[in-house]
Amino acid sequence: MSLKRLIIICTLPSFLVGCAEFSGSQPPAPLYGGAQPKSQKPAVGPQKKARSPRTAAKEIVKTQPLKDFSAIKSEPLASTALPPQETPLEPTPTEPATIEALEPSSSSPPPPPPAPELTPFEPIEPTVQLSPVVGALVSAANQNTKAGDLDSAAGAIERAIRIEPRNATLFYKLALLRLQQSKPRLAEDLAKKSALLASTDNTLKKHCWLLITHAREIQQDFEGAKEAKAKADSF
């Protein structure tokens, strides 16, 4: 009996070691008549099964979230605003340079003097005896002048002068028409011609020189106008 016990005792450890290798590799046997466990842990064996591609794809890489930017406190920038300037209560005196700049420069030409007023001029209507043909032309010229047709009136007087070239009254009438046509130079020449032909008719001579005075003032010849006015006053 002691020999059998000795053999059993010697072989028992090796048997237990062999059974330990198969322990946990197979699922536990079902229990009949009793409550089954809620969850069973998979057996952990010496060799692990290879992971399928789907399982590897479903793996989630764990990342750590960044720090909240709101937690970072920004320091306020230094204010660069200029300090408010005090408004002076009293007006600052004007500098001499500013006053000189406002004054006109000595090199600039002085403004022209205002033009003097024109001498009043009222023409006369000479009453001289004319020939029937010349009288008809003068009447036509007067009618055209009233109608505002100065060109036709001047043409009628020119035809009358060709008939009576030494008639001072016709030259005076034509000078008046040229003055109304804004031709003061031509009016001056015609009035001089009339004054020469007037002979002893001082009234006509005086009004001829008054017409010359007015024509020179229109041409800005004020010195000549004074001489013509003095000539008119002599009659």
Image: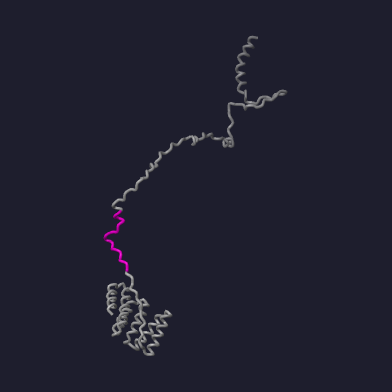
Q: Nearer the viewer, residue 29 or 12?
A: 29
Q: Which image quadrant: the N terminus?
A: top right
Is-magenta flag for residue 68? no
Colour scheme in use = one colour
- Residue extending farthest top: 2
Left or right, 42 with reference to 94: right
Left or right, 14 with reference to 163: right
Q: Residue at x 31, y 72 (%)?
A: 220
- Residue extending farthest right: 33
| Residue 152, placed above or below residue 68 | below
Is-magenta flag for residue 111? yes
- Where does the magenta region start and end? 99-115
| Residue 19, placed above or below residue 203 | above
Q: Residue at x 43, y 37 (%)?
A: 76
Residue 11: % across, % down: 61, 16
Residue 180: % across, % down: 37, 77
| Residue 94, placed above or below residue 185 | above
Q: Residue at x 28, y 61 (%)?
A: 108
- Residue extending farthest bottom: 132
Residue 31: % across, % down: 70, 24
Residue 22: % across, % down: 62, 23
Occupied quadrant, residue 197: bottom left
Occupied quadrant, residue 84: top left
Q: Nearer the viewer, residue 229 or 136?
A: 229
Majority secondary structure of magenta residues: loop
